[in-house]
Amino acid sequence: MIMVHDPTQELKFLQDGYGVNRKVIAYNYFVLVGPNDDPAGIEGLRPLDAFRKIKEYGDAGNAIWVSRGDGSGTHAKETRLWTAAGYNSTELSKLSWYWERGAGMTDTLKMADEKDGYTLADLASYLNNMKTGNINMKIVVEASEEFLNVYSVIANNPQHSNLTAANFDASMKYIEYVTSEEGQQLFAEFGIADFGKAMFNPYIKLLNSGSDPDLVQTIQEYAYFDGSECPEAYRYQAGNLYG
Amino acid sequence: MFDTITDAFQKALQLIFSGDPEVFATALRSIYVAGAGTLLACIWSIPIAVLLGLYSFRGKWLIKSLFNAMLGVPTVALGLILVMFLSRSGPAGFLHLLYTTNGIALGQALLVTPIIVSYTSSALSATDVQLRDLAKTLGASHLQTNIAILREAMWATVLSLISAFNRGFGELGIALMVGGNIAYMTRVLTTSISLEATKGEYAFAVALAIVLLVMVVAITVFVNLVERLRE
């Protein structure tokens, strides 16, 4: 069972036969964080304009971008945002202001903090590191459609020869739980006690409530494959997981 | 898994013979940090080794034991302490060495100091016993005797430097923590191997590991060859 946040890689994972029964379970937003004095002055800009301004200030030697560079979901998002802003991140990584870190979120945030750099972070990691005093940075661009981050669960495919030892039934039980009302409620509440706001938003709850069809559509455009969270071909003994 | 291993060896050969510029640059960075670290360590390690190897003073055994004990210092521990010292809020933050190749070199210099001190001082004291009596019988002064001992122990010193270089060349903890494994800036062979393995790029990781091993073996064999020719 995997819990992930990179639709493109997820589809490949399903196509390669490693996983079955994908369910979209939650969403939140990435945040662009930077030094408290925001040297590139990007606070309040639209996400892609913010990326362009970081490039401009970086080229002038006045800003540093710290990239995860580890092939993670967050790194994939960064790469797509640079592409959308009109740049190739592989080319950018050769420039002196673009630091490709190749490490986890905490290490990357720590380096950005140490060097007064900017970076893209998931909200949970940012708030957590702020709380522990590991970093002292601020969110310069937040919660917008471009920064959408969608989490899914995928069960191990018991038909794959490498995965026969993995416990498929237990994976399915877990997926049933996180998609249940009780499981969804956990996402709605997690983090409130510690940070004053929830780290994740429950997707299935949003879908069932019918309260924000525009947002549902945005999420589906971002994370669904041909209009489905898990096309028929990638389902296996799914029970009533898909209604 | 067997397929992965054979793939890895094929990929390693391709990588070595294709002359991938970034792999080349990464290997050069590894040589630079280990080389600079070893040379830097010489500045203080050789005098300490001479002191411990040729002179007698109270508490000498204790200092020698401490250096011997530090031979196996864990690189992550040293890396962690260095990060705390070198970070902006740390006592040595003004040096701006965190996340630089020179920072890694400094860390490796500290790492290899016990290697140079222990091996060289042992070689000096071993030579000392045999040579001092002989030199004195031949009527050499104290200084002349010491110079003769240093010359005789030269080869052992060179070998200790090679060990020191190899230790730095193959260590991961300091390079990862102090250097930060930044692509095109502070990424060295070991940090690159670690990253590729985390990304699941096993073939590439093994290929880099082979490059690392081949270089270590080549350097050591070359030095030993020079010794044979010298004799």
Image (cartoon, grey):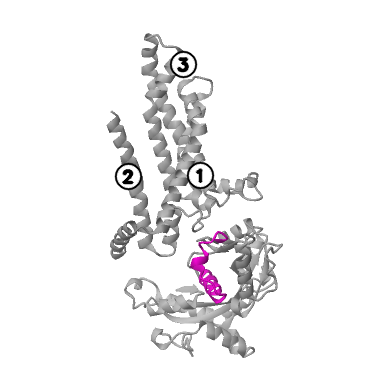
Residue at horizontal 60%, vertical 61%? A64
Question: Which residue is tagged 3?
Answer: B143
**In the displayed structure, would residue B231 be above or below residue B20?**
above
The chain that hosts pointer 3 is B
- Which circle's residue, 3 or 1, is located before the other in the chain? 1
Question: Marks 1 and 2: same chain?
Answer: yes
Residue at the farthest right position: A37
Q: Residue B29 location in percent, x, y?
A: 45, 50
| Residue drawn at (51%, 57%) of the image | B182
Q: CA distance from mark 1 to mark 2?
A: 22 Å
Residue drawn at 60 percent across, 67 percent down: A55
Labels 1 and 2 touching (C-beta < 8 A) = no
Q: Residues within 10 Å of mark 2 (few under 14, many from 20)?
A: few
Callout 1: SS: helix
Q: Which residues are magenta?
A: A73-98
The three-letter amino acid code for the residue at tag 2 is: Ala
Vertical position of residue A178 compared to residue A54: above or below? below
Count of numbered circles on the image: 3
Residue B149 found in image quarter: top left
The residue that label 2 is drawn on is B218
Residue B36, placed above or below residue B203 = above
Q: Could you tell me what secondary structure mostly forms the magenta stretch? A: helix
